[in-house]
Amino acid sequence: MATEQGGSSSTEYIVHHLTHLKVGEGFWALHLDTLIVSTLLGAVFLWIFYSAARKATSGVPGKFQAFVELVVEFVDNQVSEVFHGNRGFVAPLALTIFVWVFLMNFMDLLPLDYPALIASAAGAHYFRAVPTADVNTTFAMSITVFVLIIFYSIRAKGLGGFGHELFTAPFGSHFLLWIPNFFLNLVELLSKPISLAMRLFGNMYAGELVFMLIALLGFTVAGLDLGSGLGFFGQVVMGAAWTIFHILIITLQAFIFMVLTVVYISMAQAHH
Amino acid sequence: MEAIASVQAFTALGLGIIIGLGAIGACLGIGIMGSKFLESAARQPELTPMLTGRMFLLAGLIDAAFLIGVAIAMFFAFANPLLASLQ
């Protein structure tokens, strides 16, 4: 914690907050903070929805049940607009992505230093609380979606049909066009997981950094003079404004990740 | 010292260009989409709820590239990896 060290510069504060708690070196460096927080939030999501489903009544629902039903129906409506066919797997997948990404993004709205304070009480020097501001999380999710895209393509068209489409899809089946076709399809396929992951990561990383910059405004508060008064005022006002704007962003990004996943899977099923 | 200063100067210029051009693009995109959304909502008010959802989806898509640019710019502003090779 920069605040504990005292007298460290603003750059050190930000670099400190951008350092992961990790074990291992190089390729096998595991970001423990990301793993712990995301697993915890996944468990929270499952527990909330499981307990709502177990206590569900067909009579007048309580507020808790009504809320969970609202979320489930919202996601199911979105999926049914885009995805035609059996939703038995895709709708729960979309619900999981939406709620899990939302919860992970939500860690951005916690006061910046508090998760790190709790972690440092537990003995960890570095701690980043937002799993989706770690490129590993977003790529793990988008590569999973990529595997599902390939799986659904092959299931809908067969291995031969999928291969045939890779080489003949945009331009035609003349053998001279196989290489350009394949190249275009490759770019199209690979751009999906990369853009999905980078979009979520970029938004959350930028949001986290802006929160740090706002926190730095209050970092300069030293006494009761005009400058530190302005710093404190600026931190409160800008922090509130950015937090309110960020509520929109985190929900939107979770929604976009979900909708694009469903769109990609339904595109994979469609024949050219 | 001079080398560090010039790296910092060029980085600062780069940050301005990244954020500025990104903001121009994102604002134009949001503006065009918003005006089209209002036009179509005025033309067919019964479609407004459906269009609102799609508009927010696209707003997120348009914003994303800009925000990725901002994230990269902020990263370069506070932890410049290009300076590390000089020190």
Image (cartoon, coloured by chain):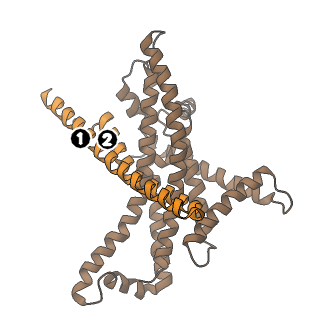
Chain colours: A brown, B orange
Residue projecting furthest to the bottom: A174
Give me the residue at 47% from left, 15% from top: A229
Q: Amino acid at mark 2?
A: Ala
Q: Which residue is mark 1?
A: B14
The x and y percentages for residue A78 are: 59, 65
Q: Nearer the viewer, residue A136 or A58?
A: A58
Give me the residue at 58% from left, 49% from top: A103
Secondary element at image label 1 = helix
**Discs 2, 1 touching: Cβ within 8 Å:** yes
Q: Residues within 10 Å of mark 1 (few under 14, many from 20)?
A: some
Q: Which mark is residue A195?
A: none
In-image side of A77 versus B69 (left or right):
right
Which of pointers 2 and 1 lies earlier in the amino acid sequence?
1
Residue projecting furthest to the left: B2
Give me the residue at 49% from left, 69% from top: A263
B6 vs B49: above or below: above
Separation of marks 2 and 1 at Cα, in angstroms: 8 Å
Secondary element at image label 2 = helix
Chain bearing mark 1: B
Tell me if I can see residue A139 in this picture: no
Q: Which mark is residue B73?
A: 2
Q: Nearer the viewer, residue A137 or B67?
A: B67
Q: Nearer the viewer, residue A251 or A135?
A: A251
Quarter of the C terminus of chain A within the rendering: bottom left
Q: Amino acid at mark 1?
A: Gly
